[in-house]
């Protein structure tokens, strides 16, 4: 049984972290990250060709996380595979022991390292969530009985700071209706907007894990504001990091404050440490989130 | 209409060089490529001048009424049979359908002079936008007359994606998000917006497309080709504009 599901359904505040599979076959660096953040995380997301850039598959890397003794959240994007491959990989994931799946649309290939690639998008994330939920009920997307069915804990992405919120909310509600049980959000900079999302989505019976992105340097802020879709660091926060004598330390302090504030309204936090894995552990400890 | 763009001139020259073509016949199109300013009389004459600058002879040229119409293009080829006979190659300033029609209308090697890019809406003269991909499984009934398959860069049916910001598209960030536009228009029309759309039937667009309105007059082979085993063919693009006598050749 998924520990993530158990914890969230028990009402426990969870911490999730994130690792990226390598470009290559050496899992060493990823597993060192896993060993650092694993002990303080309920589960660890394993990204799927994130940013439309080539990496080893989330399926194999999630298995490696499981083998290391931690619980992975297998990520599946709709960008790189058609409905046959997506269903096939979902079935494979369950047989490998992967119980959590986060279903996302995926960034457009035009912004990645293979801009000439054909973006598949045969299905969108709402449709794939519904298919995964159907598999949990014992059938494929055509309604045919499966010989053995999974029991995935299905997650989706949500974007509390993206306006217009009414339209993002509708999308999130559709995902919940399709079968998403938990949401992991894009990085939160405005606690009030997260509170609005929580109030609007709670009636759908979903758990909300709030994103915290470690703004480790002014360069990271520039990258987010210029290159990353669907995210903008507000001036106040950007100014605080930029003017700090030690931006990395200031970013950790900011993340701790965010985690403390989110503890009151979220069901968990998803911390994206951007390579500073030890910082994730400090944030968890100093925000009083370690169990 | 079919939108075309000029093709890389170096590539055209290389095509002609590869078969050692010293003389060329140029065929334009009086329909789409004329409106798109890529294959009308003006552009055909520009291509003629450019070819002559490379030391080649242009034996003749024509701008047929509709380059993709087999009967009309064969007729045009017959009218210019002398010029065509004198040419080593034919350069066609039309879409890919026009190029292939010309290639079926002469024994000479035929080369594309344009790139075919999309089925375009004419926003105003000289401004074209892609609004329909001719997918064969129209969703415009549910999307307030705005096609997400075409105008959302990811082709999502249930958007917006996570990249939408302040109502703008993530990929083409000078454009409004298609899904925001759809929801706004549905709401303005007082239409329901809660249901998500099911996965699309991509088998409706299996290539090559074929429609035959002539029923029993079609050969068995044509009927077989038009009827894929797994899908019921939908007559989505009847060639209503085809003049009479299209198959009289």
Image (spheres, grey):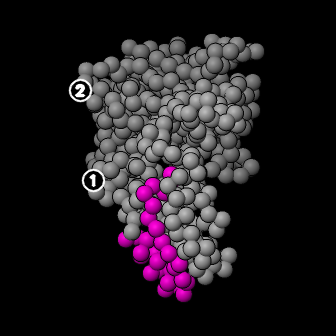
Q: Is residue A90 visible?
A: no
Magenta span has B64?
yes
Would you name the residue on which mark 1 appears? B124
Magenta span has A190?
no
Height in image: A234 above or below B82? above
Residue at left offset 74%, top offset 49%: A25
Residue B192 numbered tag: none
Magenta residues span B42-69
Height in image: A203 above or below B108? above
Location of the N terminus of chain A (image quadrant): top right
Residue at left offset 59%, top offset 22%: A131
B120 left or right of B200 in image: left
Q: Position of residue A129 (x, y in %)?
A: 55, 24
Residue at left offset 57%, top offset 46%: B247
Q: Position of residue B137 (x, y in %)?
A: 50, 30
Would you name the residue on which mark 2 appears? B188
User: Toward the viewer: B188 or A289?
Assistant: B188
Q: Residues within 10 Å of mark 2 (few under 14, many from 20)?
A: few
Foreground: disc 1 or disc 2:
1
Whichever of labels 1 and 2 marks the residue nearer the N terminus, that label is: 1
Q: CA distance from mark 1 to mark 2?
A: 26 Å
Q: Is residue A7 visible?
A: yes
């Amino acid at each position: 049984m998924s520990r993530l599901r158990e914890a969230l359904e028990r009402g426990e505040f969870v911490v999730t972290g994130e690792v990226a599979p390598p470009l290559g076959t050496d899992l060493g660096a990823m597993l060192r990250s896993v060993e650092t953040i694993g002990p303080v995380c309920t589960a660890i997301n394993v990204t799927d060709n994130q940013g439309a850039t080539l990496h080893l598959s989330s399926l194999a890397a999630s298995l490696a996380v499981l083998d290391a003794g931690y619980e992975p959240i297998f990520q599946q994007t709709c960008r790189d595979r058609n409905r046959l491959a997506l269903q096939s990989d979902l079935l494979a994931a369950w047989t490998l022991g992967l119980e959590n799946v986060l279903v996302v649309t995926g960034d457009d290939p035009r912004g990645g390292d293979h801009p000439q690639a054909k973006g598949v998008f045969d299905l969108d994330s709402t449709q794939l969530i519904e298919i995964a939920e159907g598999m949990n009920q014992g059938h494929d997307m055509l309604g045919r009985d499966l010989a053995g069915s999974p029991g995935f804990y299905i997650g989706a992405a949500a974007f509390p700071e993206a306006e217009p919120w009414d339209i993002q909310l509708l999308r999130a509600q559709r995902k919940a209706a399709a079968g998403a049980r938990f949401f992991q959000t894009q990085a939160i900079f405005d606690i009030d907007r997260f509170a609005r999302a929580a109030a609007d989505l709670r009636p759908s019976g979903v758990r909300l894990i709030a994103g915290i992105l470690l703004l480790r340097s002014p360069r990271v802020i520039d990258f987010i504001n210029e290159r990353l879709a669907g995210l903008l660091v507000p001036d106040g926060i950007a100014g605080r990091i930029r003017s700090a004598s030690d931006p990395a330390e200031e970013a950790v302090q900011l993340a701790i404050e965010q985690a403390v504030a989110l503890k009151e309204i979220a069901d968990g936090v998803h911390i994206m440490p951007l390579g500073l894995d030890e910082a994730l552990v400090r944030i968890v400890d100093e925000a009083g989130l370690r169990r | 209409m079919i939108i075309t763009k000029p093709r890389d001139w170096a590539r055209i020259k290389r095509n002609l060089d590869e078969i050692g073509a010293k003389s060329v016949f140029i065929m334009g199109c009086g329909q789409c490529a004329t409106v798109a300013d890529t294959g009308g009389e003006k552009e055909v004459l520009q291509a003629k001048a450019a070819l002559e600058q490379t030391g080649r002879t242009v034996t003749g040229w024509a701008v047929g009424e509709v380059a993709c119409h087999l009967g009309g293009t064969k007729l045009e080829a017959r009218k210019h049979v002398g010029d065509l006979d004198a040419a080593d190659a034919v350069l066609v300033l039309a879409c890919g359908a026009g190029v292939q029609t010309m290639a079926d209308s002469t024994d000479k090697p035929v080369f594309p002079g344009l790139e075919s890019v999309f089925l375009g809406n004419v926003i105003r003269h000289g401004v074209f936008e892609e609004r329909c991909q001719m997918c064969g499984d129209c969703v415009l009934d549910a999307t307030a007359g705005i096609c997400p398959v075409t105008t959302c860069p990811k082709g999502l049916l249930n958007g917006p994606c996570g990249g939408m910001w302040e109502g703008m598209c993530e990929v083409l960030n000078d454009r409004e998000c298609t899904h925001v536009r759809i929801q706004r228009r549905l709401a303005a029309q007082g239409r329901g917006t809660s249901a998500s759309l099911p996965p699309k039937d991509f088998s409706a667009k299996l290539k090559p497309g074929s429609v035959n309105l002539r029923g029993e007059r079609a050969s068995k082979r044509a009927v077989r080709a038009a009827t894929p085993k797994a899908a019921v063919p939908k007559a989505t693009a009847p060639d209503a504009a085809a003049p009479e006598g299209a198959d009289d050749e």
